[in-house]
Amino acid sequence: MAAGNWNPTLPIAANGFVEWPAGPLVLADGESMVRVEAWLMQKTTGAIQMTYQDKFLANPSSWIANDVYWPSGYAPWSGGLFQPGPALGIAVAIAIKSNVQSYYWWSEEVGLT
C-alpha cells in the first residue's frame, strides 16, 4: 500500500497560497499511483486550499499536488491567505495493484515559509 508524508516546510507564494504542496512517496511492489489529494489549512489565518496530482511517472518517489481543486474559480486563489508559521497538511494517496484500488491517509504539521 502506498505511503507518503509532507515536505517539512512549504513556501508561500506571493499570492498567499502554497504552490505547490509536495512530499515523499513510497509504493509497494507492483503498485501504480492514481491520485494524491492534499488539503492544507492554517488555524491562525483561516486559510485553506485543496490541490491534487493525478498524473505520475512510473514508480514515483515523491508527489506534488499542482492542480487546484479548491478554492475554485481562483484568480489564481481566493479566500484566506496563508502566513509564515505552522499549518496542518492532510493527504490521501490512491493507488492500484492487480486491479485492486487502495488508499493511504496521513496528516502532519508543516511549516510555511
Image: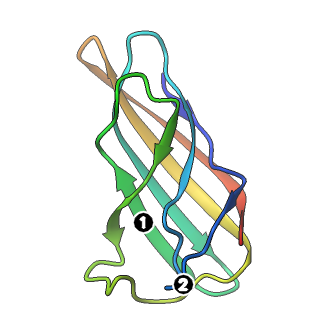
User: Taking 10 as reference, is 63 above or below it?
Assistant: above
Mark nearest the camera among 1 and 2 is: 2
Residue 96's x, y, as percent? 31, 23
The residue carrying mark 1 is 50
Separation of residues labelled 1 and 2 (CA atoms): 18 Å
Judged left or right of residue 107, residue 55 is left
Estimate how packed mark 1 is, as few (under 14), some (14 to 19) or many (20 or more) residues with alpha carbons within 10 Å.
Answer: many
Residue pointed to by mark 2: 14
- Quadrant location of residue 46? bottom right
Secondary structure beneath label 2: loop
Residue 28 vertical placement versus 90 (above, below): above
Residue at figure coordinates x 38%, y 18% from the top left: 31
- Say which label, 1 or 2, has the lower sequence index: 2
- Residue positioned 34% across, 30% down in the render: 57
Figure quadrant of residue 65: bottom left
Where the C terminus falls, by quadrant?
bottom right
Q: Position of residue 99 (x, y in %)?
A: 23, 16
